[in-house]
Image (cartoon, rainbow, N blue to C red):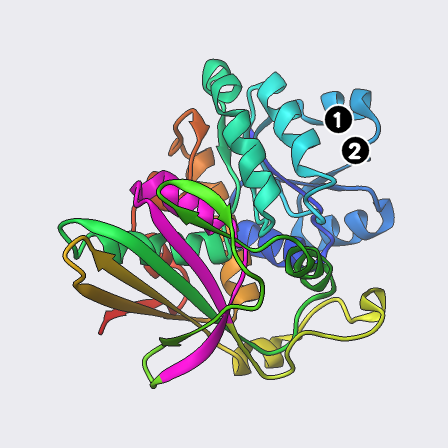
Amino acid sequence: MKKLMIYGATGYTGRMAAQHAAAAGTPLILAGRNEAALASLAASLGVEYRVFSLDDQAAIERSLHGVAVLLNCAGPFASTAGILMRASIRHGVHYLDVAAELDGYRLAESLDADATAAGVMLLPGSGGSVAMLGCLAGHTVARTSHPASIRVAMHVTGGLSRGSAVSAMASVTAETLARAYGALVAQAPGAIRQLDFGKGPVDCFQVTLPDLVTIWRATGVPGIEAYVHVTGEGFPQGDLSALPDGPDEQERLANRYQAVAEVTSSDSAVVRSVLDTVNGYTFTATAAAEAGRRVLAGEHRPGFQTPAMLFGNGFAETIADTTIVDI
């Protein structure tokens, strides 16, 4: 029987994804570098585990035997996505991850032809903001006849996990990009725009998100900007390695996420839709596990795909308590 492998299964998001996948009855293999942690988690879930590091190509090759779908939860993805995408293409394994780093998506673009030739799907962002914002943007674009530009924004509240903080720091210090006339272009840093998540306009700061690649790929709309509004604890300061693994269940329950998509048509008409969902970490793990289950069951297409392209714009609303409202 072919199985779903979760690499980085003992990390914060990986553990939750593994728990959701096991609860759904998905045939499962846990994987990573820490044998003691893997053995403990695998025993609690009653599943198989395999230990290998990504600097050992022979071990990677052996460990992908019997695997049909690989879900990469091991960040920072700049260090893991390229290795595991290429290994997946070599072995005919469909690749998923939960990355929020732009470079992994640009890599998937560059590997699209190789993956297509191998009959392999690359689905970075199977959970998280890419699934949320991609479905929301697709839903909003479908309400317009001639969409010319899209602004998307996330309202992030509550604490960050250690892994998210490390990845976010790299994104914050990198170049701010937007898509204009179909091309990625540099923006002046520090731009702020007021956007409405349903309770009145709030300040949102412009950021570089992988949705600049995925929304473009799914919709073809030539102008895309991405923003974030942060409340609660905000971005952590000091030594990020000293942060806790991530928010506990009580914190996640107390901090829901929202997102807004604002689409302007060629005649300057504007339509808006707002997404409300559970905490981002809960959404990410649940969506990634569900995506893995569906791909294992046969829902896949070769090449670089996005969740909205593969599963449809309604995918986000199938995850936990997620709704999209037109305003």
Quadrant into which the C terminus falls: bottom left
- Asked if labels 2 and 1 touch by Cβ distance under 8 angstroms, the answer is yes
Quick one: 138 or 122, which is closer to the camera? Answer: 138
Quadrant into which the N terminus falls: top right
Which residue occupies the extreme top position in the image?
A: 117
Q: Residue 204 in magenta?
A: yes
Q: Residue at x 44, y 36 (%)?
A: 295
Q: Which residues are magenta?
A: 201-228
Residue bearing mark 2:
54
Residue 68 can be seen in this image = yes
The disc placed on residue 60 is 1
How many labels sit on residues? 2
Instruction: Answer above or below: position of 232 versus 65.
Output: below
10 Å neighbourhood of mark 1: few (<14), some, or many (≥20)? some
10 Å neighbourhood of mark 2: few (<14), some, or many (≥20)? some
Q: Residue at x 70, y 69 (%)?
A: 246
Q: Residue at x 49, y 62 (%)?
A: 283
- Residue 191 on image: x %, y %: 51, 68
Q: Amino acid at mark 2?
A: Leu
Instruction: Answer above or below: position of 56 versus 51.
Output: above
